[in-house]
Image (cartoon, rainbow, N blue to C red):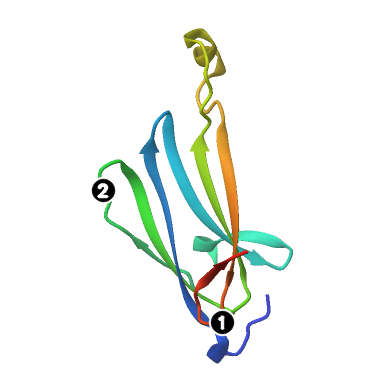
Amino acid sequence: MTTPPASRLQTVELFEDEHIVARGSARSTWHVRVNDGWVRARELPGARLQRLEQGPGSVWKCRIELELTPGTELLLTQSVPLVARKTPLAHLESGPGAGRQIREIRHRVGRDGRLERD
């Protein structure tokens, strides 16, 4: 990823969290496109992290501030437990972490620093 002139960088604020839902926990994480792959936003050089106060049902919550170039691609991944109708025996046999539903939502940094959904 080439570093653009500082005047073109935009401050972007992202939030990651995990909270309790029926049958487990739901998680939201952000990734940033770097070359041909995705890097977790919190692991980018220069990322500023702030742990936020947890409310009822919250496991953790974090604010991530990044300086990114307009046009940079971001990926929000939301993970929730699968809702499957099972018998009690089938549930016990499937063990912990029996499945998760993953939803990926692509975004792009706009010219004004706001995230635009792709």
Figure check: 7 above or below 48: below
The percent position of residue 3, horizontal first and vertical second, equals 63, 82
Q: Amino acid at mark 2?
A: Gly
Viewer-closest of 71 and 93? 71
Quadrant of the rendering where the N terminus is positioned: bottom right
Q: Residue at x 63, y 76 (%)?
A: 71
Quick check: 9 left or right of 50?
Answer: right
Residue for point 56% across, 30% down? 99
Q: Residue furthest top?
A: 89
Q: Quadrant of the C terminus?
A: bottom right
Q: Which residue occupies the extreme right position in the image?
A: 36
Q: Earlier in the sequence, mark 1 or mark 2?
A: 2
Q: Are marks 1 and 2 in contact (CB under 8 Å)?
A: no
Amino acid at dot 1: Arg
Residue 55 circle label: 2
Q: Which residue position is annotated with label 1? A: 111
